[in-house]
Image: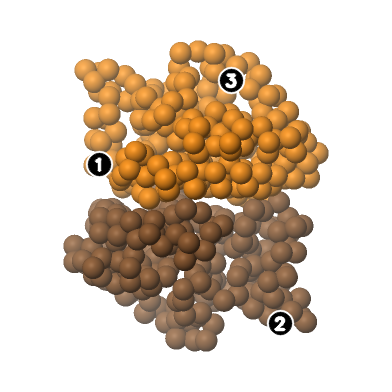
Chain colours: A orange, B brown
């Protein structure tokens, strides 16, 4: 494929699109982050609305790869992983990787819903009390259960990678999940990860891969912020 | 494969496992619904807990197919669809079907969260007020937006099936989603579907397929109930 990939996602947040950006960056793939281009060059959020009008996809992120238009972050990551040598070989490994990626996506949804428990259509300010209940339950118990699951899944395979021997798209996604949870729930994360040394070590190993380390230190990496999925609202974290 | 599939899911609800049951039934595949077998024969919910202890999966439904253990309902449906002639051919069609299936799974999550907005760890009775806010927003606006998306996706392909010409696992899943939403939110569903005749017609066509019609009328089909995902709590529906 000679054309660069075209990634459609909100231009000012990491969000679900960041899982895709990280796979593209690790692969060294040429891509255009469409909405971060100037409006005069076909970018801006108008490009997202245009795609959503024209294609049968419900939400971004979406990736245009030649004639293919793919939405759903877990599906995009799996697609790119297989294309760029970042996915396990064989049916069992591929299914296992896809399953873990979907579980990571579920955790991302849960993290999002801590600040919007009553619905994405209401402002955070209008659901702070509900958010505090859900957030503290998440930071206090749920994080530990979820991260404990990934720790066991990693330990089962020997500790080098979640599926098989080599780093795959799932390990990169787990890294991002851990960075996000640590940003949003520093106290809950610190307590939960006392019992999960293996996934922390994996996170650091993945983040040190040359292309990812370069990306994470670059201006292309949008900082975490309170418009994204992982928001640092202290009232949602453990006390 | 000579061994029957083994489906692991809660024995008293449709839930996310029902999407898998429907694909198995439509395929005429031999399967054991493990937890619905007597405990003395290795069934019961103990079988679910055993699988979750032994395998690197976070939750059920899970399908055991020979040596493969697959979790995440959308992934299982896609896997079975491809195996049993219920999936589009070609990369673009397969990706499109997987994307729509994941979007259906997202709607299922939203429907679940209407009755548990503050977290699955709390009883419904302890979050009724929050649930009423989220439920009415879902039944009042969100259903219409979501079903409108599927109506447009279906219309785009000519109206016969969501992807390509033939019924695939996605159409069967959409049928179940529509049945569930109609059960849980009869008033919101009635209003929203005034504008979506094509997906209603597709639902009825799918439900009339001989194997599915026989299944839906059989005792194997667990009735909707208020322990499942789609719960008829009138206070969450439109007034």
Residue marked by disc 3: A212
Of tags 2 and 3, which is closer to the observer?
Answer: 2
Of tags 3 and 1, which is closer to the observer?
Answer: 3
- Determine whether the residue tagged by mark 2 lies in a helix, strand or loop: loop
Residue marked by disc 2: B38
Which chain hosts label 1? A
Q: Nearer the viewer, residue A14 or A211?
A: A14
Quadrant location of the N terminus of chain B? bottom right
Q: Are marks 1 and 2 on the same chain?
A: no
- Determine whether the residue tagged by mark 1 lies in a helix, strand or loop: helix
Report the residue at 30% width, 60% height from top: B136
Residue marked by disc 1: A54
Q: Nearer the viewer, residue B103 or B67?
A: B103
Q: Position of residue B52 (x, y in %)?
A: 71, 59
Report the residue at 43% width, 26% height from top: A225
State the separation of the CA atoms marked 3 and 1: 33 Å
Which chain hosts label 3? A
Question: Horizontal placement of B36 versus B75: left or right?
Answer: right
Q: Position of residue B108 (x, y in %)?
A: 43, 59
Residue A39 sits in which quadrant?
top left
């Amino acid at each position: 494929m000679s054309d660069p990939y075209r990634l459609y996602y909100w231009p000012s947040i990491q969000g679900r699109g960041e899982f895709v950006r990280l796979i593209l960056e690790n692969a060294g793939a040429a891509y255009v982050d469409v909405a971060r281009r100037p409006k005069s060059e076909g970018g801006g959020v108008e490009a997202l609305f245009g795609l959503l009008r024209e294609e049968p996809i419900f939400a971004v992120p979406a990736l245009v790869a030649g004639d293919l238009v793919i939405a759903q972050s877990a599906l995009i990551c799996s697609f790119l992983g297989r294309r760029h040598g970042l996915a396990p070989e064989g049916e069992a490994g591929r299914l296992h990787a896809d399953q873990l990626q979907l579980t990571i996506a579920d955790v991302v949804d849960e993290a999002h819903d801590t600040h919007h428990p009553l619905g994405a259509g209401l402002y955070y300010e209008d659901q702070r009390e509900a958010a505090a209940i859900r957030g503290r339950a998440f930071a206090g118990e749920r994080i530990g259960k979820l991260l404990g699951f990934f720790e066991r899944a990693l330990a089962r395979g020997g500790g080098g990678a979640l599926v098989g021997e080599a780093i795959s798209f799932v390990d990169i996604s787990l890294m991002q999940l851990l960075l996000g949870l640590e940003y949003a729930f520093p106290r809950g994360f610190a307590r939960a990860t006392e019992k999960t040394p293996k996934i922390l070590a994996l996170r650091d190993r993945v983040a040190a891969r040359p292309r990812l380390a370069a990306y994470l230190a670059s201006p292309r990496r949008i900082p975490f912020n309170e418009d994204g999925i992982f928001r640092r609202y202290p009232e949602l974290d453990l006390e």
